Image: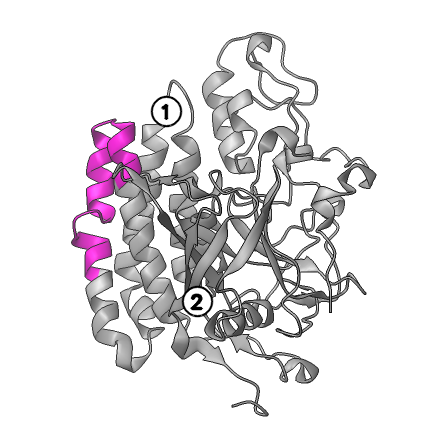
Amino acid sequence: MASHTPSIFVHSSSVPARRKCSFLSFTPLPFTSRLSCRTQRISMEIFCSRNHDAPEGSSHQCDSSLTSTSPVFCGGIKAISRTGELALRKAIPANPVMKTMQESLEDISFLLRIPQRKPYGTMEGDVKKTLTTAVNEKQSILGSVPTELKEKGSQLYDSLVNGKGGLKDLIASIKENDPDKISITLSSTLGTISELELLQAPGISYLLPEQYLKYPRLTGRGIVEFIVEKGDGSTFSTAAGGGPQKLATIQLVLDGYSAPLTAGNFAKLVIDGAYDGIKLKCTEQAILSDNELGGSGYSIPLEIMPSGQFEPLYKTTLDVQDGELPVLPLSVYGAVAMAHNADSEEYSSPSQFFIYLYDKKSAGLGGLSFDEGQFSVFGYTTVGREILSQLKTGDVIRSAKLVQGQERFVLPVSEG
């Protein structure tokens, strides 16, 4: 069954203009265009210290030279994830204590973007609170780890609290007021939290509708590795600085927690070798697999997990204008999604996928793609992002392999 080219390339101009966010009682500062509401308020307190005229409706008085007309999604809507790593961390259905700790640390990433007077005191307070929670809730954290993974869980917990790159290290880095050091340590700490959360989430936390049990599914995380080759015989430049390379590696993390059917169908196609030797088509906005793979793959219903919900919606898109945002956003450079089915936009293509090349310059309100919430996003490029911009129409996926997550892949009973 053939699929059509994703709408992001053909009719984004037909998308109606987005309504302004109802929260905006003041004009946001330039650097806060993608911050959470909590962080915006902190930023206002830091920068609005002069006794000048305040923006209408604001409780702060502010230097008007600091303001910008850039809109931002706020109010009841949390800032959407802007990196694949962040989106993947948020998507893990883990222990509520761990999610609270994670959210507190994620705020520090936003605070580090403040260009001048960084609120180190706020950062230190957040990390100390997180450390206290980790110590007091040790039993709850480790109690959510399956018995067979307890030893690894204990090691990760010790690393999080006392280890190099853990919470105590992060507090020490903040005391030094060194943004670069804080950023590196924070990345390590969040990585450890993510590993612990993945141990706590051995499978999807909801029941799939009975009519969809006939499809392959991925009940957790998987990693697909593409080996790509230039179609014209030229070479790639790699981030490692190893000189020109004829072949390049791209890794995609598949998220079966939020899109089990879509990720499962893609994983099956990879396992079956359906993408080996497939040519790519490239535009300014995306890299697509070339055409349809005659008869391969399932026609999976559109599958989108809304933020704040516990299971995906099927055969329906999200209304971003009304504040509906997906757990796995399209508005991330390297997001991986399925094209629409040619016969019905309630279904995804059986096999044609695309990698989205997000560019905020061509985005809409709040920096969101005009097609946010319209496609089944099921993963992100985490390795080889620098290769994406070098790919051209006619380049080839030499091989595609599921290198991690085989144990999470489930075939329908009729095929098992």
Residue at 19% in and 60% down: 158
Name the magenta segment's main secondary structure: helix
Q: Magenta segment range?
A: 158-184
Q: Where is residue 159 in the image (x, y as percent from the top left)?
A: 20, 57
Mark toward the start of the polypeptide (2 vs 1): 1
> Mark 1 belongs to which amino acid?
Lys
Total numbered labels:
2
> Mark 2 belongs to which amino acid?
Arg
**Under tag 1, what secondary structure?**
loop
Residue at 52% in and 37% down: 38
Q: Is residue 199 a member of the stretch shown in magenta?
A: no
392 w.r.t. 101: above or below: above
Disc 2 vs disc 1: Cβ atoms closer than 8 Å? no
Q: Position of residue 102 (x, y in %)?
A: 40, 52
Quarter where residue 95 is shown:
bottom left
258 w.r.t. 202: above or below: above
Q: Which of 4 and 130 is in front in this view?
A: 4
**Under tag 2, what secondary structure?**
strand
**Mark 2, residues whose alpha carbon is within 10 Å: few (<14), some, or many (≥20)?**
many
**Mark 1, residues whose alpha carbon is within 10 Å: few (<14), some, or many (≥20)?**
some
Q: Position of residue 275 (x, y in %)?
A: 52, 64
Pointer 2: what residue? 221
Q: Split into 4 quadrants, where in the image is the N terminus?
A: bottom right
Asked whether residue 197 appears in the rendered view, the answer is yes
Residue at 46% in and 39% down: 390
Residue 118: mark in rendering: 1
